[in-house]
Image (cartoon, helix red, strand yellow):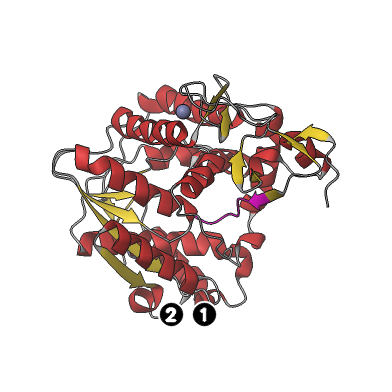
Amino acid sequence: MSGQDLPAGMSRCVLCGEPAVARLRDPARHLCAAHFTGFFEERVSRTIADGKMVRPGDRIAVALSGGKDSTALALVLSHLLPAWDDVHPVAITIDEGIAGYRDETLRAAQELTSRLGIEHHTVSFAELFGKDLDRILAGREQRACTICGILRKKALAVAAGRYGATKIATGHNLDDEAQSVLMNALRGDLPRLIRDAGRENPCFIPRIKPLSLTPEREIALYLMLCDAWKELPECPYTRYALRAEVRGMLSKLEYQHPGTMLHLIESKKKIERYCAGAQVPAAIRRCRECGDPCSGELCQLCRLRHSLG
Amino acid sequence: MIDAGARTVEQVLVDLGINPIEVIVSRNGRLVPDDAVVSGDDEIRIIRIAHGG
Ligand SMILES: [Zn+2]
Ligand SMILES: [Zn+2]
């Protein structure tokens, strides 16, 4: 047992007695840097195993924006993957073309992958769609996150196909997932969540979210402890989004009522289970215009193209 | 300067109107849990967890 003479007011790790860096809830316990990091990676490993997210032979495209969530994802995977049979990562960065924001995160992504020795490719909106995001959005900033989300999804799918990936892993964390449940409810479109989750369409490269049970705050702490934390600029468009409001509201609720975010995820999963039998598997259709697999006449991207004129 | 008699990090943050789950705090250069006790001599750094995946 070390840490005999800790200064007053300092708590110790319940497992080893070293100075604690985190107080976790449910169950309440203090952990030191090493034990927190171990716990963090174990939870990701369990999320992947429970969700059967990875299979031998998988080539996993890690959507690496260079921001904190995807950086943590790349780090954890680089620690976990060597223990798995024949699973390989390839990092993919989408350069949307957001002035004053993307350059720094792009550089961070490059530094990280060369440090971890991960294959890395960058694909830009300009290359795929002929214009960068700033030019696509001009005058439509209110819809920035919706539009960017649709384009980014497409760009990732194209890049993942191009570099031979069998899965796409994104850095969505517990906070993101809880926000999405609430936002869909607030928009009167909760069924959309279930539709998206239930889509087992063989034409899509499956998407996995290994951090979906990990709180955002713990991701930041993990990065600091791995010496990979960077103060990066925020995306200039987030202030237009409903998500920013929902985010503040939910983190207040989570603080006052611990477990709120997990409860939202559990609700979603319960609804999914109730619907599982009732869902009529939609026939796989192809977009009338571009031929991409989709659920309606036109895919999301072609509908967006029309609305942008 | 924050006047922190002998309070926990959490109390200091709440008094400043900061939600403790939106930040991480270091005391004298070391990351500490939010129930760590701080006093006036301590150098406290509040690191905001900015958004952006
Ligand atoms: Zn420990
Ligand atoms: Zn289409």
Q: Residue at x 61, y 67 (%)?
A: A236
Q: Which residue is mark 2?
A: A131
Kindly identify the amino acid type of the residue bearing the numbered disc 2.
Answer: Lys
Same subunit under labels 2 and 1? yes
Kindly indicate the quadrant of the structure image that contains residue B20. top right
| Disc on res. B12 | none
Q: Between residues A15 and B51, which one lies in front from this camera angle?
A: A15
A67, above or below A77, in the image: below
Amino acid at circle 1: Arg
What segment is highlighted magenta in the picture?
B46-53
The answer to whether mark 2 and mark 1 are in CB contact below 8 A is yes
In this view, the residue in front, A133 or B14, is B14
Residue A207 at least partly seen? no
| Closer to the camera in the image, A250 or A121 | A121
User: Circle 1 is placed at which residue position?
Assistant: A135
The relative height of residue A306 versus residue A294 in the rendered view (above or below) is below
